[in-house]
Amino acid sequence: MVHMDTKLIHGGIDGDENTGAVNVPIYQTSTYRQIELGKNKGYEYSRTKNPTRDALEALIAELESAKFGFAFASGMAAISAVLSLFKTGDKLLISSNVYGGTFRVLDKVFSQFGISYEIVETGDLEVFEKSITQEVKAVLIESPANPLMGVSDIAKIAKIAKKHGILSIVDNTFMTPYLQRPIELGVDVVIHSATKYLGGHGDLIAGLVVTNDEVLGQKIGFIQNSTGGILSPFESFLLVRGIKTLGVRMERHCENALFIAKHLQTHQGIEKVFYPALPEDKGYAINSAQASGGGGMISFILKEEYDYKKFFASVKLIALAESLGGVESLLCHPASMTHASIPSEIRCKMGISDRLIRLSVGIEDKNDILKDLQNAIKLSLKA
Ligand SMILES: *Cc1c(COP(=O)(O)O)cnc(C)c1O
């Protein structure tokens, strides 16, 4: 079997059969001339199937060790397509730190169709298993989860889910298949916001879904074509291009993040650092067993003597911005940004205080990133 680094570059559909082009071209077409009535070359209409999207879908399936891949116009379109598998009366269990948009679409959109959810602590397997009642049809988790980098045992959750006949779904955005492959751990469906590490350059919005199951593959493909939230040929091309460098980028993200996390850990202005590759981190053992690195996301809590608003105003190199996973370092204030849609009492219960800061560690020079952070912490000390 070829190594992941080789798959990233040659996986899926390696080049264009028609012309020999090394890269699959952007097939910017909506429709296809048919040979005769009832006979075509495998393509009829680009919502259903497009060669550039095919290349991406085959690639993500191969990288995640799955049979079927599907590309969507955003991570949320991908998640919504998966949630469309469920019907009135069905309930999903979600981990307590799921992406804010996932919570919102369940809470405000799918609830309208009688699909409910319950937030459970999936880090605690007993609590999780006890929550599986008759109406529960699936569990949806992230590991590490946004923004406290909480780790859940993916293989054990998949096993418990299987035992109770419910679907296991993992949002693998933070880890990417380079570091973690949930299908290999027994999970049924994997989702990505490819906007983040897979694209990697902060220049596109995309979502992906993979599964190994024939029936689920059929259903998700049907939903993709029926609801139509597909990824365009141009974006599909950009994403294939971004994935080629995923290996070198993730190595550097991991190296830089561990460096920053270790330094912040001993900084006098920091109360706590969350990063699953720190041996002191709660999720270290499980993350090390199920993933080959800690990824590029860390979060930390500023001490009370420091003004978090001043901290955000004082960084120079690092941008204050939504999103993550790009080559550039980005800072985010979960309480007012990614998790603003979650009511404050639920948010506090989740441990997302105002002094919590999330950092997407980019692939710039690690000392430059550190200096920017140290300087901003220093400037934010209250008088
Ligand atoms: C960003 C993100 C999403 C949503 O993806 P979009 O591409 O922004 O629609 C879903 N899950 C996680 C973990 C994310 O970080």
Image (cartoon, rainbow, N blue to C red):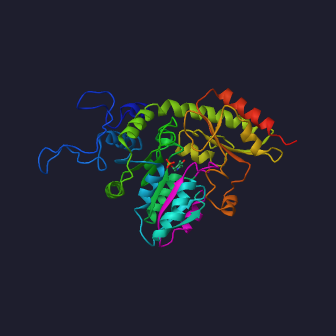
Q: Is residue 287 left or right of residue 158?
A: right
State whether residue 137 is above or below residue 35: below
Q: Residue furthest left?
A: 36
**Nearer to us in this view, 120 or 2:** 120
State whether residue 24 is above or below residue 214: above
Identify the residue shown where x is 13% and y is 44%: 35
**Nearer to us in this view, 335 or 127:** 335
Q: Toward which corner of the image does residue 352 lie, by quadrant? A: bottom right
**What are the residue bounds of the magenta stretch?**
123-151
In the rendering, at what x and y percent does residue 326 appear? 54, 36
In the rendering, at what x and y percent does residue 18 appear? 22, 31
**Nearer to us in this view, 315 or 277:** 315
State whether residue 124 is above or below residue 373: below
Q: Is residue 100 left or right of residue 32?
A: right
Q: Quadrant of the N terminus?
A: top left
Q: Is residue 319 left or right of residue 87?
A: right
Identify the residue shown where x is 81% and y is 38%: 268
Identify the residue shown where x is 46% and y is 48%: 74
In the rendering, at what x and y percent does residue 355 appear? 74, 49
Identify the residue shown where x is 85% and y is 43%: 382
The number of numbered discs placed on residues in the rendered structure image is 0
Q: Is residue 135 magenta?
A: yes
**Nearer to us in this view, 260 or 193:** 193
In the rendering, at what x and y percent does residue 296 appear? 59, 38
